[in-house]
Amino acid sequence: MGKTGQSAGYPILYTQEERRRRDASVWTLVQGILAPVQFVIFLVSLVLVLNYLWSGEGLWAASVSVVVKTLALYAIMITGSIWEKVVFGRYLFAPAFFWEDVFSILVLALHTAYLVCLHQGLLAPGALMALALAAYATYVVNAGQFLCKLRMARLSAPMRAEPVAGLSAAGRTP
């Protein structure tokens, strides 16, 4: 879903006003920092979880890493909702990011289920780590959705006018 119209064959994700709000928002920078930080946390945690499943060692480190990953997810979800409100006027399910938000809810639900199961002792360690892997699989899909959307936004961005040869950027000859 996106805005009506197309630019360079891609759906337009932002109106000019939404693009202005996106570019002016501190939350855009926050998201740009949190996303790669969360991805690094995910990679470290994935290694720890897989190590536990492979060797049976390091349960505590794997469990803590999933908790840290979940806290990073909460941070990016909260700040992302604020970003969406600033840019689109709603906290979730703006048309331009509807399906990403739908899948984000699944990612959030699985990560939260992990925390509940860990806290309540509802699953054996192996099953708990399997739940973490399921949460991580959905996270990878969701991250892919957002990367595709980022690429689409860049490809659909209005082209900036280049100065004509022999003219300065102000439109005057040197």
Image: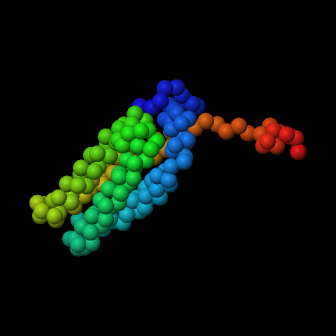
Question: Residue sitting at 41 percent across and 43 percent down?
Answer: 85
Residue at 12 percent across and 64 percent down: it is: 121
What residue is shown at x 40% (from left), y 58% (from top)? 39
Query: Please, is residue 13 above or below residue 63 in the view?
Result: above
Kindly indicate the quadrant of the structure image that contains residue 129. Answer: bottom left
Q: Is residue 85 visible?
A: yes
Residue at the limit of the structure toward the right, as seen here: 174
> What residue occupies the far top of the structure in this picture?
5
Q: Position of residue 48 (x, y in %)?
A: 30, 68
Q: Position of residue 110 (x, y in %)?
A: 24, 52
Quarter where residue 136 is shown:
bottom left
Relative placement, left or right, of 91 versus 164 is left
Relative depth, front residue between 39 and 129: 39
- Decide which of 51, 59 is in the foreground and name it: 59
| Picture coordinates of residue 61, whole percent (x, y) | 27, 72
Is residue 134 visible in the rendered structure shown here? Answer: no
**Where is 108 relative to 14, above or below?**
below
Locate the N terminus by quadrant: top left
Which residue is located at x 24 percent, y 49 percent? 109
Quarter of the image for residue 157 reads: top right
